[in-house]
Amino acid sequence: MDERTPILEGRVDCVQPAEGYRFSVDSLLLPAFVLARRGKGAAGLNLLDLGGGCGVMSAVLLRAGLAGRSLSVELNPQLHAAALQTARVSHLEGQLECLEGDLRSLDLAALPFFPDLIISNPPFFPLSGGRVSPNAMAAGARHEVHCTLPQILEALRRLLQGRACAYLTYPAQRLGELLAALPAVKLRATALQLAHPRLSQGALRFLVELGHGDEPLEILPPLEIHAPDGGYAAWYENLVAAIPPRP
């Protein structure tokens, strides 16, 4: 059974499975990062969401007005069905398109548009990295059951054209692995931000912008996920403010 979940103070609705895999704060951190990088002066871009799950990241960026159209590609049929419902309950029919498919074999010619930006919150952990969930949906979302980091980067090599950029989030301990793999797919990191639960603690995630350009890597100030009162810090307030209230 799927359930409707209002997020960002009710400004976005998404539908996700009541059991199995449910999206986490990472699915909000990445849109916040994209908006911080691309929000000023950008609107109506074509967005491709690889491993889009229930469509939450696409819905956030569409509601914020950064993207005018998004294609969410998801392999799991239950999450794909949830993304279709997310498009409906968020009144994004005609903007949020959903494809049940495998990003490893996705071909640029098969897309309805050339993407201006690509986002992905892919499986974080290799199969050797801790206990794999017995739930197939959760296992595929969290562990590299269906796609690995090199396969994600190979998909970006095929799908990124011209000045288009890609945005990813991963566990901080995999940063070296990602940077070492970029030359093989002819991509460069152009912006990097480490996300810490609190600034006094080690980094939990990294957020990265990738592209074909030759501009130097920009190291952004660290992001603090949680505020002292236990809620989310300023990045969350900025994300809420970027989305107009419902009429």
Image: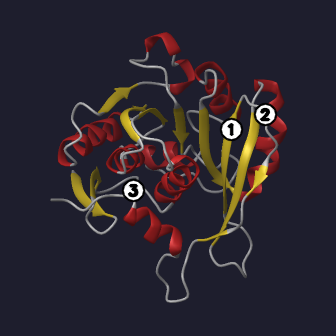
Does residue 144 lie above or below 142 as drawn? above
Within 10 Å of disc 2 (Cα), the crowding (few <14, some 14-19, many 20+) is some
Residue 116 relative to residue 58: left or right: right
Helix, strand or loop at label 2? It is: helix
Q: Nearer the viewer, mark 3 or mark 2?
A: 2
Q: Are marks 1 and 3 in contact (CB under 8 Å)?
A: no
> Closer to the camera, 172 or 183?
183
Q: Nearer the viewer, residue 3 or 229?
A: 229
Disc 1 crowd rating (10 Å Cα; few below 14, some 14-19, many 20+) is many
Residue 206, x across and y down, in percent: 68, 56
Quarter of the image for residue 171 reads: bottom right
Q: Which residue is mark 2?
A: 182
The disc, 1 or 3, on the residue closer to the chain's N-terminal end is 3
Residue holding disc 3: 22
Q: Which residue is mark 1?
A: 210
Check disc 1 and give the amino acid type: Leu
Number of residue marks: 3
For the residue marked with disc 3, what is the amino acid? Arg
Label 1 to label 2: alpha-carbon separation: 9 Å
The picture places residue 82, in percent across and down from the top left corner, at: 28, 43
**Residue drawn at the location 73% of the way across and 82% of the way down:** 200
Does residue 117 lie above or below 232 as drawn? above
Direction from residue 159 to residue 181 in the image, left or right: right
Which of the two discs, 1 and 2, labels the residue nearer the N terminus?
2
Frontmost of labels 1 and 3 is 1
Cα distance in 3D space between marks 3 and 2: 30 Å
Q: Which residue type carries mark 2?
A: Leu
Which quadrant would the C terminus be assigned to in this image? bottom left
